[in-house]
Amino acid sequence: MENKLTNVIFVRHAQSIYGENDRIRPLTEEGLEDRKIVLETIKNRTIDAFICSPYKRSIDTIKLAADYFGHEIETDERLRERKAGSFEEGLLEKRWKDFSFAEEGGENLNSVQKRNMEALEEILKKYEGKTIVVGTHGTALSTIMNFYNKDFGVKDFLRIVNWMPFIVEMIFEGNKLTDISELSYVDKNS
């Protein structure tokens, strides 16, 4: 029997306000406005579920769309952002060169990728043949993209780092990625 195609639409959160508690950072006024792009991008589709990082900025980014479709947002702790430590110059490149490296107080990219891939594998199994929206973060999404394309590295991460929101669709047959496309983004660096 042929596997059904499963569409996973990843939504990296809109612009947020930086603060001490990473879990509760709200969206900026621009971010609240930009989340309308998520709804515009997906409103002509059938969406079967919304799953999200438990972080406020990610939930708030997809909430407008979830409400439109009449779905609750299910959260999964494994989809959270990387625990950041130091922001010293050069550490970003070092992390991307060696996925097992983490600065003091930080989380390495191996760990981020492993927990995000565990969550994605469960999503693919549970929602086979469906279309799912997954609210996520820049580093988390980048490690998923790297899982399927080992050439995805620090330059690719830096290309998208200021895209908030950033919407990417991945199509799977079973747990095999068959296609990936960037649907929409707002460049907050311009």
Image (cartoon, rainbow, N blue to C red):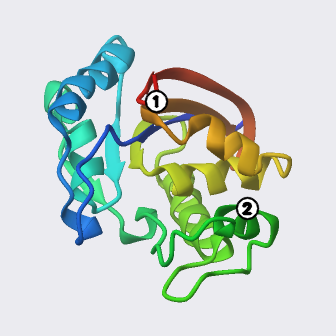
SS assignment at label 2: helix
Question: Against 7, is 59 above or below?
Answer: below
Residue 74, labelled with which disc?
none
Q: Residues within 10 Å of mark 1 (few under 14, many from 20)?
A: few
Query: Residue 20: x percent and y percent?
Result: 24, 71
Classify residue 122 as left or right of residue 34: right
How many numbered marks, from 0 up? 2
Compute the Cα span from label 2 to label 1: 20 Å
Per the image, the residue denoted by label 1 is 189
SS assignment at label 1: loop
Query: Residue 116: x percent and y percent?
Result: 55, 63
Quarter of the image with the C terminus is top left
| Residue at 71% from the left image edge and 41% from the top image edge | 156
User: What residue occupies the far bottom of the structure in this picture?
Assistant: 104
Query: Residue 88: x percent and y percent?
Result: 57, 71
Please name the amino acid that badge 2 sits on. Answer: Glu
Residue 93, labelled with which disc?
2
Classify residue 114 as left or right of residue 65: right
Q: Which image quarter: residue 91?
A: bottom right
